[in-house]
Amino acid sequence: MNREGLLCAKKGYPLYSLLGFLFVLFCKAEADLAACGNIVWNGSYLLELLAVSLVAGILLGCILCFVSCRLSARERKQECGQVFLGQGRVFWIALALIVLCWVPCYLAYYPAICAYDTNVQTGQIVDGAYNDHHPIAHTLLVAGAMEAGERLFGDVNTGIALYAALQMLFLAGALAYGISLLNRFRVRRVFRVLLLLYAMLFPFHWYMSISVIKDTVFSAFFLLQVLSFYGILREGGNPRKITGLDISFFIGTLGMILFRNNGKYAMMVLLFFLFLALWKGKQCRRLWGRMFLNAMVAFLAGNLLLTALFRVTNAEQGDRREMLSMPIQQMARCMLYHGGIGVLPEDDATMEEQDKALINDFLLDESYREYRPDISDPVKRHTNTYVPRYRTEEFVTTYLNLLAEYPGDYINAVLAVNAGYLFPGDTTHAVINENGVDKGLGYVQTRWVDAELNPRGIYKDSKWELLHEKLEDWADRNAYLDIPVLKYMFVPGSYLWLYLLLACILILQKRYRMLLPLSPVLGYYITLFLGPTVQLRYLYPLMIVLPFAVLLSPGQSGLVQKECDEKDSVKG
């Protein structure tokens, strides 16, 4: 096999086999946990799990490696894609087509989809009592839209409609910018067209683009940052000159910090890897220095802006219980299985009294009885954060004691709440929020709390009721799960493994620098795994980044040839 091929079989088979092993291991463990409700991590189960994972995983890895090598050999001689239009024209054409496809959903849900946290944030705005549980920048953005609607149009609802329209344009603009970069770097035309169709027709874009939530704005900034990073690496450029890509990278990073509280943690991972590249990299140190400086300045500026907004609005510090989602789940599960509370027949009542005492102080009103494996909210809302904050040593000691005594329950708690992220066959992610009474609580959430929003001047005013009914039905039925094969574009459990597959390919290509734009993806995934549950809005930033990451990684599956890299001075 040609050494310049996509994969070197000698290194490829072991790496792919490792990926296959992990995939099968997590899928089997998640399937067993879903079927039984609890896994007893004894020797016989571990032996069975490892044996199945090794055999099936190695087989899967070898098949993937063989197919990748064959595809590389077949596509080696293909030419670069041609550039028929300038980058600016491609952007505006793509933007127009995307918005044209999204507008019907906007009209159907006019003025917007006010689900998720909209009622909480608008409540803060009306009361003038802000806290940073939800990003203050986004709450103030919604407040500005409501005030503009009332002052300019005499109607708060029109202000919300204006906000949704601007948000839709911003998200569409980020996607159009990515498509223009594909044109700029001469990715083959067929893939540019396919990605444009994806941007236009992927239903989750329709719903998320007009949902009044921080996650949509964050997703657009996240995509902008990753796209700019790839552009800088592909183009190189003069390290002494600030380019448009540097500016867009800065803006994307700034927006990530401002519009999601966990954006800063994703950025910390990126800063860590950029520092390593600057410290250890023997080549391109000027490039890494420039990137590190850009990222650090944006990171600091974002945090300073947040501090300023916090003081200007006299906001209160939000409760930090969200950060304790995983310990909450683990401790609650231990109480059910070992606390002697009589909820489960499996309860062996072996927990020490001092550990139970601390848990009762931490999880008030015996809220561990409300434990749900797939979401921490039922227990979390009754959490006394005074305990970990002011009795830190005692809390940590109890947490570690329980980990040493009941490691299997800790593992089960982690697997259960993250099933949607780890297992493509999981369907619990689609019904986590459903209560059997209200509609609009599927994987795509569209429920309005009319009793709270209507008095604030926000009300449903659909301009296309027939389409509204059809879109509501599609969302409520979680109809994407009925689509053969293509449903894996929608389920959250596909994306982690696709990102890991992309990382493996880049490692085998020895294109290590192209792994750097994926470092904020890693950081963001870490926050998801420690989070309260699986939701579309949490995963959405990673959904929209993945196809661009695949196409902007040079040499990936023959989509962008080495010859293209040598001609990338073309600006379009």
Image (cartoon, rainbow, N blue to C red):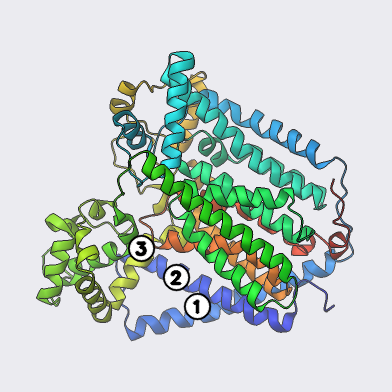
Which of labels 3 and 2 is toward the front? 3
Distance Cα–Cα, label 2 vs label 1: 8 Å
Q: Secondary structure at mark 3?
A: helix
Residue at position x 57%, y 40% from top?
A: 205
Above or below: residue 293 compared with residue 277:
above
Does residue 126 appear left or right of residue 495 in this picture?
A: left
Report the amino acid beneath label 1.
Ser
Residue at position x 38%, y 44% from top?
A: 310
Residue bearing mark 2: 28
The answer to whether one can see residue 536 in this image is no
Does residue 434 appear left or right of residue 566 in this picture?
A: left
Q: Which is nearer the eye, 391 or 314?
A: 314
- Quarter occupied by residue 502: bottom right
The answer to whether one can see residue 16 in this image is yes
Give whichever of discs 3 and 2 has the lower sequence position: 2
Distance Cα–Cα, label 1 vs label 3: 19 Å
Report the amino acid beneath label 2.
Lys
The reply to whether the C-beta atoms of the residues labelled 1 and 3 are less than 8 Å apart is no
Does residue 479 appear left or right of residue 459 in this picture?
A: right
Q: Which mark is residue 416?
A: 3
Q: Which mark is residue 53?
A: 1
Report the amino acid beneath label 3.
Ala
Q: Residues within 10 Å of mark 1 (few under 14, many from 20)?
A: many
Residue 553, how many percent across, how many down?
Answer: 72, 61
The reply to whether the C-beta atoms of the residues labelled 3 and 2 are less than 8 Å apart is no
